[in-house]
Structures are given as C-alpha cells and as structure tokens.
Image: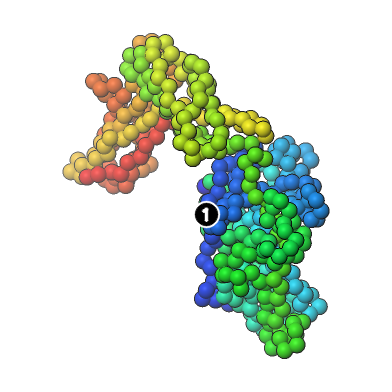
Amino acid sequence: MRHFTRALVSTVLLGFGAGQAAHAELAMNGLPHPVNKFPLWIKDSKNVTLQLCLDGPGTATGAPGDYCFFDPVEEGNTFSEQIGFGPEAFWWMAEASVPVNDGSADLTLALEAAWAAEIPEDGQQFAFGRVRIRIDAPVAGTYKVWHPYACEPEIYQVTTPGRRAINVTRDLGGGAPFADMLTGEVGPFLVWDETLPAPPAGYVGDGATPHGVTGSPCGANGNVFRVEGPAGANLGGPVGSENVVETWDFTVMGKIFDSATTPYPVVIDGATFYRNQAGTSARMNVWAQSDPTALLTRSGQPGSAQTMESDGEGRFFNRRSYSNSNCTNFKSTVTVSTENAMGKTTETAPLTDSVKITSAVYTPAKHELKVVATTSDEFKPASPNESDPLNGMARTLTARAGSRSEVMIPDPVTAGKYSFIFTNMYAPPAKVVVTSDLQGRDEEVVTP
C-alpha cells in the first residue's frame, strides 16, 4: 500500500488550538469502481455517502446538470478516455472566500481522486483529503484562522506580508485500499443547510452557489471560515472589528451515492481448492464482495457456471465439488461476474491452493529451525506433465526464513505434507513464510 502526507506551508504555523480535530470523521469507503478502480463511495460519520462527482461537462457552474467539477479527459490517454476524466476528480469539495483589505482569504476543503504521477494510469490511483488556506496578509504579525475542521484557531506568524503570505496545503491519503484518506482532517462532509434554495436532487450542493452549510464536527458554530489579523491589519471587518472577517457561506460539490447509476463492483477475496492424492475428489471455494443487491455468477472452471450464495450484506460464496476427470481439469483462474443496467462487471483471480504452516520450531542447542507445512492440493500425478503445472505436477512448497529460502521436502507417508530443517541458524527470524508454486501462502511465528 502506498501512502503520503503532504504539507506545503509558505509561512510559519505556530500551532493549533487545544480543540483542533485530530482526524477526519469519515467512516468507510466502498469497493473499487469496476472501471476507474477508485472507491465507489465514501461514507462519513453522519451516514452521508458520496460517489465521485462526474456528471455533466465538469465545470460546476451550478446550471442544471453542471454540478460537478473534474478535469476533462486527456485525449490520447486510453485509460482517461475509458474512465471519463483526467488528472483530478472529487467525491466532495467545499470552498469559501472572503475579501481581505485589497486581497482575499480563500479556503478549500476536498476529498480528491488523483494519480501518483499526475497522469491517469491504472494502478496509480491516489485518494486524499485536502485542507488549503491562502490569505493575502496586509501586515506582518499573528493571524488566527477558523474553519469547519478547526474547532480552535490555527495560528500563523507572518513575517513578510503580501499576496498569499499564508499559503498552506495539507494533503493526507494514499493508494489502494485507500484507508489513509479516512484518517485526514476532512470529514464529516459539509452539506447545504435547510435555507432555501435546496440543493439539486441527488447532490449536497450545486458546486457554484455560496450557501450556508451544516456538518462541522465543531457544531453549528463551526460552519464558518473566519480570519483574525493583528492590530492594524484592517482586514475589512465591521466597525469595531476591523481586524476580523468571516463568511458562513460555502460552495459545496458532492453527489449522493446511487447504486443504480453505477456498475456493480466485484472483488474476489479468494479462490482456493482441495484435491486428494489420487486426483479423484476435489472441491473449490470462492469468496467475493459486491453490492448487496447484486447477483454474482462464478464461472471459468469445470462444469457449468453457478450463482454464488449471498449473506445479504455484500459478501458472496460458492463451493463446487468435483470427482474423477474433472479433478484434473482445473483452470488457472476463476471468473466472477455480475450485471445491472449500467453494464456488466467481470473480474478474474488466480485459483490457488491453501497453504498452512503447522509448526515452525527452533532448537537452540542444534541451531536448527524445522518448518512443517501442508497444501490443500495433495495430488501426485502418475505421469508428471510440465506443460500443465496445475494438473500435471505435484505442488512445490518453499520455506523462507530470514534471507534464506529452501524448497521443502514432501513427506513420504502423508500426502500434502512438507518439511524442511534450516541448519546453522544462529539467529532465527521472528516469522517464517511458506509459499507454493500456485501462490498459496502462510506465515507463522517461530516458537522455541
């Protein structure tokens, strides 16, 4: 998993107030979108669930059908053309601006989808929360800034006044499985309050119109962007408070998640099989996740396709038993598919054996580490066939202890059992790892 924390500050941040929120109140993210591979939705602690806002031309003018902002498709970039946007898109964004003397104070809060190299490329997805503060400071001195995710003021010391004398960007997030973005400063989502006009149906704002909001974790008094300058700053506030300016109005962008407008996601959590020594009896288990209302079909192996069982909460399972010739006709991958009005989603995953380390024992007196493991594929073909390693060869298990890797020895009596003794091991590792040639894997703590 890749992750990053980025803070760009062009002035001195003296600190946060004692009540500063430590992290976002974002609860969870959905499964990857079947095409763009970003989380299908993000849910906050108040159960506001948003999907990437990708409707309309992407200019967020607030005109009917133009409530989202995103970068346009990069022509010639096949993946960008496939997903329908360019370097940036957003689940949510809120912005506020207030005049400051002859300049302005600007706040951007966002939950963003982007790319590691800033170019749309599958496998380079990044998602992060952003807090950006830019203030034109007319004089040097101490400035205090409040915003919906700063319950106590952020305090900045400006030594060189001027345009964007305060220029702060804090990004926190990372790549799949995108858990890092849930721990940043952004959240819960700000949404338009009950003051008319109401947001467009299916959105939390129109992306363009300044409007009162709710959602700050600091309570009703936290739904504000406020700047307080030093004596003599004359920021342009009301008489008697010339050094304080604020706004309670934000432009807000975000689309409420609607499963009917997106293809169903599919994630295959695992596909393993058991096969006996003679190759006459076998069974296969497949686990997957999708929308709770989806109907998933498992295929790609001997016999007809089968509908997977559902627990009603988005988890699916299929078990298929085999006998005789079907036991030696397995394919290297399993396919799971589903379909709704927005299209068909198909995912594949490797079929692996299940590896289990039964013991990893170190004997100090002998400086030996003995590792014993099993594989669920016990099959030993009478006539090995290297051109079909899945069905024509016995499994190969490899034990790794520290920097040493060794091929394990099959047990002459018990099918599927393997062992190896590492000798001259004076400093054993804390854990050992055993893998098979079919990608089965297990790790275990070394015991005395």
Mark 1, Cα crowd under 10 Å, few <14 / some 14-19 / many 20+, is some
> To which residue does mark 1 refer?
27
Is 214 in front, or is 163? 214
Residue 266: quadrant of the picture: top right
Q: Is residue 58 left or right of residue 109?
A: right
Determine if residue 3 is in view: no
Residue 270 in the image: x percent, y percent? 46, 33
Residue 257 in the image: x percent, y percent? 63, 47
Residue under the point 60% across and 63% down: 215
Is 128 in front, or is 307? 307
Residue 194: quadrant of the picture: bottom right
Q: Is residue 57 above or below residue 208?
A: above
Q: Is residue 297 above or below residue 431?
A: above
Residue 426 in the image: x percent, y percent? 26, 45
For the rendered model, the colour scheme is rainbow
Residue 195 in the image: x percent, y percent? 71, 65
Identify the amino acid type marked 1. Answer: Ala
Q: Is residue 425 above or below residue 70?
A: above
Is 166 in front, or is 58? 58
Image quarter hosting the C terminus: top left
Q: Is residue 58 left or right of residue 421?
A: right
